[in-house]
Image (spheres, rainbow, N blue to C red):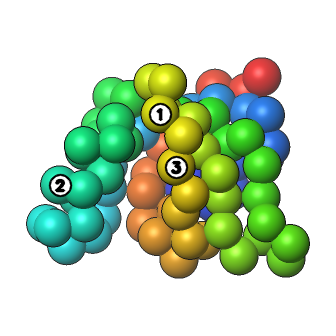
């Protein structure tokens, strides 16, 4: 399952980030790395981007990047 498939208000644990090294490093600085708990706070109109909360840090991601982040779904 990927991060883009998680519904608003649900949590997941990051398993793998499939992106270039510079993007992985930037996400790691924002607490989005394997083993991290992330929560989808809300989505933009037409779900083109997501607002996430990762260990107290809020960040926005485009759906294309979120589709490359594999997660283990944790539900509510």
Residue reaching furthest to the right:
45
Mark 2 or 3, which is nearer the eye?
A: 3
Q: Is 32 drawn above or below residue 38 in the view shown?
A: below
* Foreground of the two, 33 or 41: 41
Label 2's element?
helix
Quarter of the image where the C terminus is located: top right
Residue 54 image offset from top left, x and y in percent: 48, 33
Q: Viewed as shown, does residue 34 lie left or right of 52?
A: left
Q: Residue at x 52, y 49 (%)?
A: 59
Q: Viewed as shown, does residue 53 lie left or right of 42?
A: left
CA distance separating discs 2 and 1: 15 Å
Which label sits on residue 59? 3
Residues tagged 1 and 3 counted as in contact (Cβ below 8 A): yes
For label 2, the residue is: 25
Q: Is 6 drawn above or below residue 21 in the view shown?
A: above
**Sooner in the amino-acid sequence: mark 2 or mark 3:** 2
For label 1, the residue is: 57
Residue 42 image offset from top left, x and y in percent: 78, 49
Examine the image and state in which quarter residue 75 appears.
top right
Residue 43 image offset from top left, x and y in percent: 77, 58
Q: Viewed as shown, does residue 64 lie left or right of 42?
A: left
Label 3's element?
strand
Q: Residue at x 53, y 62 (%)?
A: 61
CA distance separating discs 1 and 3: 7 Å
**Sooner in the amino-acid sequence: mark 2 or mark 1:** 2
Q: Residue at x 79, y 66 (%)?
A: 44
Q: Is 18 drawn above or below residue 27 in the view shown?
A: below
CA distance separating discs 2 and 3: 15 Å
> Would you say residue 50 is visible in this rendering?
yes
Q: Residue at x 53, y 77 (%)?
A: 64
Which label sits on residue 10? none
Mark 2 or 1, which is nearer the eye?
A: 1
């Amino acid at each position: 399952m990927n991060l883009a498939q998680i519904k608003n208000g649900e949590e997941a644990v990051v398993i793998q980030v499939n992106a270039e090294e510079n993007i992985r490093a930037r996400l790691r600085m924002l607490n989005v790395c394997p083993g991290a708990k992330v929560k989808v706070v809300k989505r933009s109109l037409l779900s083109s981007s997501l607002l996430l909360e990762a260990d107290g840090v809020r960040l926005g991601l485009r759906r294309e990047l979120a589709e490359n982040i594999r997660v283990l779904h944790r539900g509510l």
